[in-house]
Image (cartoon, coloured by chain):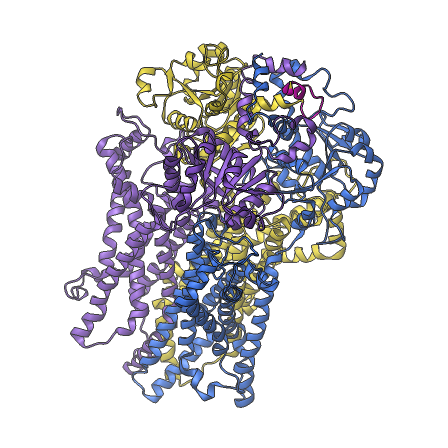
Chain colours: A purple, B yellow, C blue
Amino acid sequence: MDSISMMGSSSPVFLSSTHLQQAQAFFLPNGLKNGVGVRDGGDFGRTARIPAPNTVAILGSGDFSKCLTLRLLRCGFHVVVGSRHPKLAAQSFPHVVDVTHHEDAVEKANVVFMAIRREHYSILWDLKHLLEGKILVDVSNNRRVNQYPESNAEYLASLLPDSMVVKGFNVLSAWAMQQPHASNTSTQVFICSNSLEARLQIMELARQLGFLPVDMGALSSSRDIENMPIRLFPSWRGPVLAAVSLSIFFFAYSFVRDIIHPYVKHKQSNFYKIPMEMVNRTLPTVAITLLALVYLAGQLAAAHQLYYGTKYRHFPLWLEGWMQSRKQLGLLSFFLASVHVVYSLCLPMRRSERYLLLNTAYQQVHANVENAWNEEEVWRVEMYVSFGIMSLGLLSLLAITSIPSVHNALNWREFSFIQSTLGYIALLIATLHGLLFGWRRAFEEDAYRFYLPPSFVVALALPLCVILGKVLMLMPCVARKLHRIRRGLDSSHYRRPRLEPVGSAAHVSPERVTIM
Amino acid sequence: MDSISMMGSSSPVFLSSTHLQQAQAFFLPNGLKNGVGVRDGGDFGRTARIPAPNTVAILGSGDFSKCLTLRLLRCGFHVVVGSRHPKLAAQSFPHVVDVTHHEDAVEKANVVFMAIRREHYSILWDLKHLLEGKILVDVSNNRRVNQYPESNAEYLASLLPDSMVVKGFNVLSAWAMQQPHASNTSTQVFICSNSLEARLQIMELARQLGFLPVDMGALSSSRDIENMPIRLFPSWRGPVLAAVSLSIFFFAYSFVRDIIHPYVKHKQSNFYKIPMEMVNRTLPTVAITLLALVYLAGQLAAAHQLYYGTKYRHFPLWLEGWMQSRKQLGLLSFFLASVHVVYSLCLPMRRSERYLLLNTAYQQVHANVENAWNEEEVWRVEMYVSFGIMSLGLLSLLAITSIPSVHNALNWREFSFIQSTLGYIALLIATLHGLLFGWRRAFEEDAYRFYLPPSFVVALALPLCVILGKVLMLMPCVARKLHRIRRGLDSSHYRRPRLEPVGSAAHVSPERVTIM
Amino acid sequence: MDSISMMGSSSPVFLSSTHLQQAQAFFLPNGLKNGVGVRDGGDFGRTARIPAPNTVAILGSGDFSKCLTLRLLRCGFHVVVGSRHPKLAAQSFPHVVDVTHHEDAVEKANVVFMAIRREHYSILWDLKHLLEGKILVDVSNNRRVNQYPESNAEYLASLLPDSMVVKGFNVLSAWAMQQPHASNTSTQVFICSNSLEARLQIMELARQLGFLPVDMGALSSSRDIENMPIRLFPSWRGPVLAAVSLSIFFFAYSFVRDIIHPYVKHKQSNFYKIPMEMVNRTLPTVAITLLALVYLAGQLAAAHQLYYGTKYRHFPLWLEGWMQSRKQLGLLSFFLASVHVVYSLCLPMRRSERYLLLNTAYQQVHANVENAWNEEEVWRVEMYVSFGIMSLGLLSLLAITSIPSVHNALNWREFSFIQSTLGYIALLIATLHGLLFGWRRAFEEDAYRFYLPPSFVVALALPLCVILGKVLMLMPCVARKLHRIRRGLDSSHYRRPRLEPVGSAAHVSPERVTIM
């Protein structure tokens, strides 16, 4: 009576209990039956045609199938494996596993893992009627990105339109599956399906197996999910390409000015400078250019917003891509700047440096110059070295907050303080570092070899523009307008959600770099 | 019959099933109804006055409301949006969303998100009777820390005493809500409420939306939660202030001794030393002082425990705050030490260094000194440089184990081995580095310019005291007493839980620094 | 009626709902009863002998007991504490906690935490009949690794064979338990039990308390779990031992050649070289040897697979252990290489360097050599310094991807690209760095002091072998055979699951280092 009165309650909270039971009970490990006794058996047990709720079928008997089986058993599930050669395959599975023919396996469970390659999906043709209404989990991977015109899961769904196809588990290595659950290793499992019911059930199953399910929405995401385990730094491709192109350009530029020009004009062989001096001249120019590019993206976005008077209008695709590459551009900039520092620090330990110093000492003695002190030169070098170190120190803070676990410990305001405010200061100091390095050479005629300005002039043009742009954006009239736009106080009707936490709209703005 | 016998079971495990159903079923996504068929409909469906369990209302139609709506829809919930201008607002929501008036929205759901600003809470006055017994989730943020005398959520609770007010979701940016669930980004959601029932339900809702709920207890935590997204490194404020104050002091001290004194006494202009040598003299003194402060806090805590003979007595507030700043102090110390290293390494590349070297060579030639070798000086420099590098190497291990994800992979014993044992060794070696740098100058009269001792003497006083304190604490009589106190073997009746894992009490002690 | 028809449904999904209720409802926080009203009370409430489902008993009243109590209360559970001196103990617990005698406490709950030391397990003897069929959670820790022949939990299980013993929660410090749930701190809880039912229930309880349960399987894992909080870098022991042994060997080798030999042969005292030059000669040799050892392990594994023609045969234990140490070996190699860089950079700031330079300048002037330039020496040094920097840059990428949270953001292909491809390139460049450093000295007779070859010759032998081995493995005939073996295309019947994601078998191979 007690239970009935409970069930009959009209409490709105109660009504949906069965839905929950469906979502979760489906995957109830069988171990829990221990305490229930006879209530479970009887009519519904493991008799043919009515799959037991805690049974999972796996088609295929390869490595993935074996590891998944062990994991499922460990978490208290029954496993039925479907194989073309059940007797042979059974040897490599534990005894409690029911290794049988495909048809038989499919009949015994409501959830079927497809641990077979796409090329063999044709065998499913004969099982079509048995798979009707069941959940099929496509775990397959491809060898190359976008290998087929449609994803494996979408292909499977087109073959079996009456089944609920779920994509997932493909990012797991057999190794990850053998680890204890919830260990420190990456155990995110990306899941998508056109059936919300199936997707939620498989996400719950993933959770019960100790993985972290990530809801990727409809089956159209399956292409992305299939590309995940075989992608190779797609987000780094553009920034690395930019860095390499800039490096080649600046290296060639310096080569012409500093090696070719003295050789042609004065028959002076400076080729020994290639391994270190030339490299060390290229590195900082590329680094500061990349850092400027990081902030240029945000300024172009701000200009776009000012021009259209709204934040709800999409940026052009190239700008969107550029803005999403800011983290990578910033990290590359820091990496090149660090290597530049090591190169610079190694300069005094070179033999060439030593020989030149000794020769200078010889000449000073012969010229009888007691004191070679040049106050201007001393100050210039002390200042530009000091600015360089400061700039590196600030950039290292930006890099540290890009480590995922450090980044996660910051709120948005702290993150943007580091990445935007400190980042701009780092750019400013790095520019001063470059200007002090160049000093008056930009205005000396003989610095223009082959009519080419010194490379620091070329390298500092972009950073100076970006700093100028920032100054413009900080002017009250522009800043106020931008602030209004970013708080959504425009009258535009086309609205696109953007990055603000409620009530702190001012903390998020596209000119803030996310070196995450 | 089967189900009834199940329900009627007197198993103690069974009884509370309905509680669970309430907790979780409340937020059951509607997609799961697919498999249930007619059982769900009928009397309870979506008819007026009896809210459907999977329906969530949102008051307000701004950016946050839009993003939350999309997230809820994606996870299978029904959404009703309450707006002052439903027709206008409806344009920016998907068609499946029911955009209506506030009253209507509130009636249709048991959970109501308040996505409106605190200034507009007055509109809730008219809805008071409708909100009775419902869960209100306050997602609002402020612009400044502690902007109002009471938190927004507490203000809301005072307006609507008959509703269950929950604070939460305010830390989410609209961007975080648009990401796939459970991605790598920070998706912690801090939740508090005076109603345990409401808190657990909203935590479950957060989990279903793919966030990581963090239980913050009663509504009095709402002030902290509201400050979270707008705080700016509060835990760094004290340590940074300490570092800046020390920097100013030591810089001024060196300036007087090394710049003013030679200028006044010998008319010697050493101003060129400011950008590098002075900075590089300030950095290591501040770094070693900060490192000593890290361990001094633990020693004061130990002294407090020894004095009162118990570990269950609270530390004074200033000591508590100091101990919680040890991580930040240690990281600042490492950062300054690293910058010091870069500055030191850059010294040989200065022009001033070059000129002085050339001048020395000139003088050596003129004085006809064939060999300038000074064995003592050679040994002193080789030793102090070597000690400096070792100290930096150890400090870098402390810094690496402060990265959250590295720290999480260590147990308490490993963490305290790195942070306490290696940390003390680093302090010892750094002190030796300083002593070797100073050498005999502490005892030379002309090192006392303006009667001021050399800055290394001032800088090393505190580290030497801390090392002495550690030696005292390692003495058997003191160590034994401290060990007893920390294992809780005192007779005090006032007891405060402290940091020990059961049975390994010895591994946790306040003198161990947690540069986490 | 509605609920009965729901319950009577023959839906296969439905049947197991009670199992789920058991698993989860057992730990239902009592706060949820608020909305249920009278339905809960009556027959089953808190009357004697029938434990309420949301009640947890804790035996013992120490620090752990107190912290666990606070956590349980916060999450809505009832807590009964069993103590030998209930009246005394009650003073240090909140008033809502029922502090009573052991027998009484045990009767009131189905889950009993054993927060007492192993030495006092004997008191359980009298409670044996009361504990029958209940879940006992052993949270005890030991002081030393493997302190007793059997783990505490196994000992408890042998004392009480009719109870379901679960090991868990021992890794938690009292501090971790006082934190808000799900905070950034490490809150993994490792759980094992021979009863699947008990294990799943306690994992669910852990989750409800805001911890991350990790399923460790059967009770035989309890020894590992008990060792966890007191282990001290077990995985680093071998690699550190290897590094220390190699350091001692190479240091002694250099000492004999560079200090003893000149002293014996030429009465030349080079002892000043010990603190820096000798250390800096040892560091790179150890670093490159460790890096070679990383890749040698993979090559031996590949040779093993080629020899037996299958990937399913276990590696010998020593090789298995070596392969699992590759991450640590690689990180040590990077650490030593970094310290080597700092040492090298500090060389020019030594007094000895300065004196030698000045003396050389003196001699050059006296010998009247205007230009000391030596083109070959210049090129050699520029090249080897440049190669050294490149190698360090690549190694730093390997080290960064070893940070857990960075590693988690990479897929297997990206990780192995960094760790294997870039790692081999780093080894190659480091070897070139060493060869250029040595230059022709390997072939000069007077470089063989005491008939010992220069240390760079000894140090580079192993890296050269490993590079040769890699070249062999890249030869088409070998590579093809290895590829076939690793895709599982051999006919072996003994099969062991290995690391491949399905369909991308080629991306996982033992020669790929996992500096994780």
Quadrant of the image occupied by residue A504: top left
Work out whether A441 lies above or below B309: below
Residue nearer the viewer, A417 or C81: C81
Tell me where residue C174 appears, x and y as whole percent: 66, 40
Q: Residue furthest right?
A: C126
Q: Is residue C188 magenta?
A: no
For the magenta stretch, what is the residue range?
B2-14
Q: Is residue A505 left or right of residue C446?
A: left
Position above or below: C307 against C414 = below
Q: Nearer the viewer, residue C57 or C249?
A: C57
Question: In which quadrant of the rendered image does the N terminus of chain C lie?
Answer: top right
| Residue C402 placement (x, y as % from top left) | 49, 54
In the rendered image, residue B3 lying in the magenta stretch gets the answer yes
Image quadrant assignment for residue B10: top right
Q: Is residue B193 above or below residue C360?
A: above
Counting from the top left corner in percent of width and height, residue A13 is at 55, 18
As drawn, is C120 to the left or to the right of B222?
right
- Residue at image location 41% in from the left, 72% down from the top: C433
Asked whether residue A473 is in view, the answer is yes
Q: Report the label total.
A: 0
Residue at image point 74% right, 25% down: C51
Residue at 42%, 63% in the rendered image: C480
When the figure is inspected, residue A65 is found, relative to residue B146, above or below; the finding is: below
Percent x, y of residue C108: 76, 27
- State the residue at coordinates (26%, 32%): A313
Q: Is residue C188 visible?
A: no
Please tell me which residue lies in front, C5 or A383.
C5
